[in-house]
Image (cartoon, coloured by chain):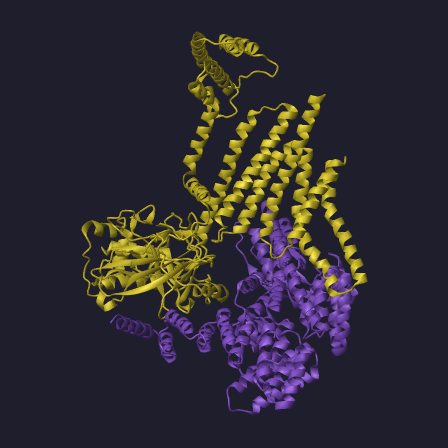
């Protein structure tokens, strides 16, 4: 009687715990959804409605109403509450008819309707879970679905990420509570129905992996979405965003106007190309990628922690120019600079700064004019570098076109400008270049309507179209095919119109790709072949000027703080948006995202190995003979369980060993006797251990003989074992 | 010897220190040079340095403020001006800059505070009186503004600026005669004085305001006349917008569009985009309407509002109302678009729910802004506008809505008797009473108030039961005014239909009915003028024709590719676009 009472008590307290944890998860989801509309909704109303929904579901659960009526009642209740509250408001108005009181209807409804769907979810979930244990399993999955939906609608592919610490803690909390829910559910079943406890051992790691997998999938989809939305040039990094270290072409891109950074340069407002990477290693299938070979290119691409001077090649006609970068939402380690940077100085950031990093860069920009560059006859670049910078995949079609375009141009500079002008004047700018039938997007762009090759369509809509990467890609390959060293550069295009008191706002849509061509003595000179003519039928929103409200606040902050060199040699504290633990988690997540296809099977294998072989491992490390025999015997049992040969609930070990001897011709009987002896005997001799080892080997022999290899292997990989 | 050395060292140090510090004029010169070269970073650093060396000199703060003000950075400029005010509180130039910053930042109460400060120091600053009266208008303090201006006119004699502001304040109070009188006096004064180009602009603004006044009092011909005068004086975006509004109330799409497009070309504010969005919405071009409205919605710079008789709240109210209607129309449209399978239907349904949710969101936001305006008007005792706004907020709560509608009606019909029809229409909408709507409909000016007529017909069609004679008659009448109103409100035109040989009748008829059309097979008889089916659709193997049965003229004929994939659906979509003129 007492035992039964204790069991009831345990189950009851477990029920309460499950009830509480479920509602913690639901509240977490509601608050996440509320965050999106926090300016429009009232938090007190939301919390009250949440509590009311939980309470109502509990009250209805205690009644004996049929399920369908219970659910209908739960849906009707909010409307009944609304009627009561409206009656109450009417009474107030009767006594005190002022506009403020008349507006109470509106205030109520403003929160009431948005809360209806959450109300239904909260109350129906609670009721269903209270009435059907099995619903909790479904609930765990539905919670994940809701969270992903909220997450996707919340970020909406904006490059403004949630604070990494908040994000990491939030997701960890969610996973932990979900696992707790599962654990408690299992425990409850264990107490009430004697369910196999091992389910939990399997489910918890499986659930953790599944949840991580789902988040990784969402994260990878999100990354793809971002890259597409960011003009195909920007992708998320660990903390913020950076340019991709490769240049491939996409059939369609979008652009967003999220603020990336502020940039300051003294003097007249002008168009500038702030370089992030040069992509010079051409591979036919992959496109242009960033080379890691320092012997070929040694361009700095991260901001050093201390003031650093970079190698100055000493090219002719260069002018020193200072720039300051105030990073808002970009990888803080990314070095940007006008071509080419010679010095970088980190600047001390201030407390509660809106910027995650500040640094200044001294660059030497070219002032060479066309007439100077015309004097360059050939390239004096070293042989192996020359081959590298003129690699165009021996594409004869590209070369033919380049030769045709530069016909009658003998001068090196003239050839380059002829290619640039050809692209600028004969192609359209488009964010939707379209899909190539044969998959070759460059050909689709370049040869769709080539008047030089005679493939001209009368329909101007058939003219090639693409965004900046297409133009840069095509020009680089064409220049290279003529033996002119060229490379693609990616970074931001700065518009003079966005200048306010020497500050320039840089937004995501300003991500750009252009071409750098090498000229003897003058170095790498920029050429921007992107057409300014938008494809017919398409609209491109030309920026109308800076967002003064946002810009004013940021400039005010800069002007109110002194810009001094940061000599601490450390990254700004704002860069590391979280603690070391969070950084570790995020780093791990990053590796997961990249190598999930290797890491996940590895984790699975390790887990399976631990589940199936932990007894054998314990046997190896155990000191006493008794423990060694015990673990060896348990391992033998585990081997049988892999093939779903297991002891029935009422069956003794001896009965079991006799049964499998009869049914499967596997001898475990003698080994069982030794094991039982080890359990009940006062002492165990070394001989007993030796005997147990021999019997184990015999058992293994029988096992292998009688269980086909295919089942044994399948049984190993399947956490639940296989039926044979 | 030691003392002598120390003195020399001290002298050297002090010389060194003083040699680093420029004189005030030295700083001024260097600052000017830096600004000229657009080296603003240097200029700002010099100004800050100068301020630290000459902390009592408010001029450096003023100049720094001016630098920011020039670049439209009003909040930082304001900080500098406020510092200058602390050093020299009596400087009206500084106070004027401060009030301007508050004005551009749409902080009208502080703007009023500083204008009053200026007038305390210099009661004869007529420009500040002018500005203050404008602020009174923007904060609905009409009576205070009128008192201020009447005093000023009495004291300083007639000034056209003051007269114009006085007229606008009377406009706010629905005082037609006084408002018109002061507008005309201001305009005539500007027209007589031909010395400056600004006079034409002033007269143009005056005529524009006058046209708004006439429109408010339902004197449309005069409104058009004054709008034309405004444009004759000077072509301004607002003149075109006003003219476009008048054409829109006549439901003349092309004329209105032309005017709005003219305005768009010269407009530096989002007003032309708002008007274009409204026009496209009225006539069923929902995608275009959405594009313009969303563009305005995402704009963050509202400094343009300072020179218009509205505030940020009113601007947001207008945008949310537009978006509410656009998304609602898109939701209805998605629901009505015909489909050939369940997946398409589900996709359309989800699209419809999505737009409906967006519409709901903007409806709530619209109500919240309307509520703010209502309460502001209540505070200032402008009960007509307050009651009207309270009616708009409470439309979903008929009892409360009717209470405020009656209160507004009582005041307004006393001022403008013709407005009664509009109140009757609103009452009909809230109570779903077709009699009231018909009553209003009969009282609207069929030429100038066609927009209201169309609105009444849409409401009536929503009340009448589908498939009834009354419903069809209302739709026929609505179609002749605005075919674009149909699909966005979930209506379908009653159509007599004829299929020529070898056309898959059932499938096409089904798709047409999904799109809301009420179909009747061809009767073969000549239609009576009052027949419920006034339009006929004739579909043959490779073409279709839409015929107006009252005139027996084809209003549209189109050929299609009979071998095309998914032919029937494309055919029906093409018919929808042709009938409703929404392509």
- Measuring from the top left, give residue A601's x and y in whole percent: 44, 32
A350 above or below A8?
Answer: below
B211 or A330: nearer the eye? A330
Quadrant of the rendered structure where residue B63 is? bottom left
Lateral position of residue A475 relative to residue A694, left or right: left
- Residue A698 left/right relative to B437: left
Tell me if I can see residue B329 in this picture: yes
Which is nearer the eye, A387 or A272? A272
Instruction: Name the residue located 53 percent from the left edge and 48 percent from the top edge.
Output: A152
- Where residue A150 appears, as percent x and y from the top left, is 56, 47
Image quarter for residue A525? bottom left
Tell me: residue A348, above or below residue B162: above
Please say if A27 is above or below B5.
Answer: above
Residue B189, how many percent across, how many down? Answer: 59, 90
**Quadrant of the frame with the N terminus of chain B:** bottom left
- Write down which chain is painted purple: B
Q: Is residue B219 visible?
A: no
Q: Split into 4 quadrants, where in the image is the C terminus of chain B?
A: bottom right
- Residue at 52% across / 67% down in the picture? B301
Task: Please state the total of marks drawn on the protein image.
Answer: 0
Q: Nearer the viewer, residue A7 or B215?
A: A7
Q: Which chain is yellow?
A: A
Residues A648 and B250: in front is A648
Measured as percent of width and height from the top left, residue B379 is found at 70, 71
């Amino acid at each position: 009687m007492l035992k039964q009472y204790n069991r009831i008590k345990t189950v009851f307290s477990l029920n309460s715990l499950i009830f509480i944890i479920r509602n913690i998860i639901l509240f977490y989801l509601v608050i996440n959804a509320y965050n999106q509309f926090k300016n429009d909704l009232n938090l007190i109303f939301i919390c009250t409605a949440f509590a009311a929904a939980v309470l109502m579901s509990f009250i209805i659960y205690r009644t004996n109403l049929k399920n369908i009526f219970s659910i209908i009642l739960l849906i009707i209740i909010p409307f009944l509450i609304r009627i009561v509250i409206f009656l109450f408001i009417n009474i107030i108005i009767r006594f005190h008819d002022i506009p403020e009181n008349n507006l109470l209807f509106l205030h109520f409804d403003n929160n009431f309707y948005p809360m209806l769907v959450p109300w239904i979810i909260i109350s129906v979930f609670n009721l269903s879970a209270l009435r059907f244990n099995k619903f909790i399993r479904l609930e765990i999955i539905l919670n994940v679905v809701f969270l992903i939906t909220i997450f996707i609608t919340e970020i909406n592919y904006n490059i403004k990420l949630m604070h990494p610490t908040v994000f990491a803690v939030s997701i960890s909390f969610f996973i932990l509570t979900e696992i707790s829910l599962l654990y408690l559910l299992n425990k409850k079943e264990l107490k009430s129905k004697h369910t196999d406890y091992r389910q939990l051992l399997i489910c918890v790691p499986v659930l953790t992996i599944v949840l991580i997998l789902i988040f990784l999938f969402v994260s990878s989809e999100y990354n793809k979405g971002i890259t597409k939305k960011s003009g195909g040039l920007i992708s998320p990094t660990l903390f913020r965003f950076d340019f991709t270290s490769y240049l491939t072409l996409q059939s369609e891109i979008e652009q967003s106007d999220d603020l990336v950074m502020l940039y300051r340069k003294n003097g007249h407002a002008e168009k500038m190309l702030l370089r992030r990477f040069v992509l010079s290693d051409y591979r036919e299938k992959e496109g242009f990628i960033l080379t890691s070979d320092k012997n070929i290119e040694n361009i700095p691409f991260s901001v050093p922690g201390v003031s650093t001077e970079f190698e100055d090649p000493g090219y002719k006609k260069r002018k020193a120019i200072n720039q300051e970068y105030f990073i808002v939402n970009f990888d803080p380690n990314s070095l940007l600079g006008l071509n080419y940077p010679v010095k970088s100085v980190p600047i001390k950031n201030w407390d509660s700064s809106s910027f995650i990093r500040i640094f200044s860069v001294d660059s030497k920009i070219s002032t060479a004019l066309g007439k100077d560059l015309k004097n360059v006859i050939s390239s004096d670049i070293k042989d192996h570098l020359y081959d590298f910078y003129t690699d165009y995949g021996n594409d004869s079609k590209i070369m033919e076109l380049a030769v045709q375009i530069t016909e009658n141009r003998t001068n090196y500079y003239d050839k380059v400008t002829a290619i640039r002008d050809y692209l600028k004047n004969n192609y359209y700018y488009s964010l939707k270049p379209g899909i190539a039938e044969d998959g070759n997007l460059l050909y689709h762009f370049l040869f769709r309507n080539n008047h030089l090759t005679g493939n001209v369509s009368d329909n101007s809509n058939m003219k090639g179209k693409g965004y900046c990467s297409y133009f840069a890609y095509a020009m680089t390959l064409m220049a290279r095919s003529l033996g002119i060293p060229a490379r693609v550069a990616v970074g931001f295009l700065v518009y003079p119109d966005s200048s306010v008191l020497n500050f320039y706002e840089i937004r995501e849509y300003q991500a750009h790709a252009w071409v750098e061509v090498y000229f003897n003595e003058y170095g790498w000179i920029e050429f921007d072949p992107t057409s300014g003519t938008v494809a017919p039928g398409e609209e491109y929103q030309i920026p109308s000027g800076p967002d003064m409200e946002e810009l004013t606040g940021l400039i005010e902050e800069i002007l109110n703080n002194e810009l001094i060199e940061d000599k601490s040699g450390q990254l700004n504290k704002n860069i590391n948006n979280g603690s070391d633990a969070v950084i570790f988690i995020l780093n791990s997540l990053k590796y997961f995202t990249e190598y999930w296809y290797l890491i996940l099977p590895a984790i699975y294998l390790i887990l399976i190995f631990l589940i199936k072989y932990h007894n054998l491992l314990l046997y190896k490390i155990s000191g006493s003979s008794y423990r060694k025999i015990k673990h060896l015997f348990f391992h033998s049992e585990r081997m049988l369980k892999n093939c779903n040969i297991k002891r029935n609930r009422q069956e003794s070990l001896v009965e079991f060993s006799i049964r499998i001897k009869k049914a499967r011709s596997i001898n475990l009987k003698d080994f069982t006797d030794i094991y039982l002896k080890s359990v009940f005997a006062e002492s165990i001799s070394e001989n007993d251990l030796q005997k147990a080892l021999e019997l184990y080997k015999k058992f293994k022999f029988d096992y292998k003989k009688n269980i086909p290899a295919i089942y044994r292997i399948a049984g190993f990989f399947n956490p639940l074992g296989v039926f044979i | 010897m030691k003392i002598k050395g120390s003195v020399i060292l001290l002298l050297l140090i002090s010389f060194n220190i003083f040699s680093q510090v420029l004189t005030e004029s030295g700083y001024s010169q260097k600052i000017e040079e830096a600004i000229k070269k657009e080296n603003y970073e240097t200029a700002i650093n010099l100004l800050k340095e100068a301020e630290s060396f000459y902390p009592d000199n408010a001029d450096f703060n003023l100049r720094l403020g001016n630098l920011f003000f020039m670049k439209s950075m009003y909040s930082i400029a304001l900080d500098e001006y406020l510092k200058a005010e602390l050093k020299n509180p009596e400087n009206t130039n500084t106070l004027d800059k401060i009030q301007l910053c508050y004005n551009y930042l749409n902080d009208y109460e502080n703007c009023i505070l500083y204008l009053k400060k200026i007038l305390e120091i210099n009661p004869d600053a007529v420009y500040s009186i002018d500005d203050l009266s404008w602020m009174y208008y923007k904060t609905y303090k009409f009576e205070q503004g009128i008192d201020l201006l009447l005093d000023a006119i009495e004291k300083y004699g007639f000034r056209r600026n003051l007269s114009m502001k006085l007229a606008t304040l009377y406009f706010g109070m629905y005082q037609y005669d006084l408002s018109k009188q002061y507008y005309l006096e201001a305009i005539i004064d500007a027209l007589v004085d031909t010395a400056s180009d600004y006079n034409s602009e002033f007269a143009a603004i005056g005529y524009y305001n006058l046209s708004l006044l006439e429109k408010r009092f339902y004197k449309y011909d005069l409104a058009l006349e004054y709008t034309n005068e405004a444009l004759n004086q000077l072509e301004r975006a607002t003149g075109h917008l006003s003219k476009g509004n008048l054409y829109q109330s006549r439901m003349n799409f092309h004329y209105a569009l032309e005017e709005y497009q003219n305005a768009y070309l010269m407009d530096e504010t989002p007003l032309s985009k708002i008007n274009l969005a409204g026009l496209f919405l009225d006539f069923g071009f929902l995608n275009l309407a959405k594009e313009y409205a969303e563009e305005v919605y995402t704009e963050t710079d509202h400094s343009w509002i300072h020179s218009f008789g509205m505030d940020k709240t009113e601007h947001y109210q207008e945008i949310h109302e537009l978006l509410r209607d656009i998304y609602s129309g898109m939701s209805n449209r998605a629901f009505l678009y015909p489909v050939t399978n369940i997946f398409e239907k589900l996709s359309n349904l989800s699209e419809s729910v999505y737009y409906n949710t967006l519409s709901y969101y903007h409806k709530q936001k619209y109500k919240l802004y309307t509520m703010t305006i209502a309460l502001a008007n209540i505070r200032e005792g402008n009960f007509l506008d307050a009651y009207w706004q309270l009616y708009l907020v409470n439309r979903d709560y008929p009892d409360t809505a009717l209470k405020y509608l009656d209160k507004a009606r009582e005041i307004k019909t006393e001022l403008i008797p013709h407005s009664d029809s509009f109140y009757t229409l609103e009452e009909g909408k809230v109570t779903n009473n077709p009699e009231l709507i018909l009553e209003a409909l009969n009282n609207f000016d069929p030429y100038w108030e066609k927009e209201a007529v169309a609105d009444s017909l849409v409401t009536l069609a929503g009340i009448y039961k589908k498939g009834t004679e009354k419903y069809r008659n209302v739709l026929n009448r609505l179609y002749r005014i605005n075919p674009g109103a149909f699909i966005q409100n979930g209506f379908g035109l009653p159509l007599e239909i004829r299929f020529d040989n070898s056309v898959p009748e059932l499938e096409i008829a089904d798709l047409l009915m999904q799109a809301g059309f009420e179909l009747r097979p061809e009767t073969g008889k000549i239609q009576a003028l009052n027949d419920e089916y006034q339009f006929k659709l004739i579909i043959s193997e490779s073409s279709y024709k839409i015929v107006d049965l009252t005139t027996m003229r084809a209003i549209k004929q189109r050929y299609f590719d009979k071998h095309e994939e998914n032919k029937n659906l494309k055919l029906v979509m093409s018919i929808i676009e042709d009938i409703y003129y929404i392509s």
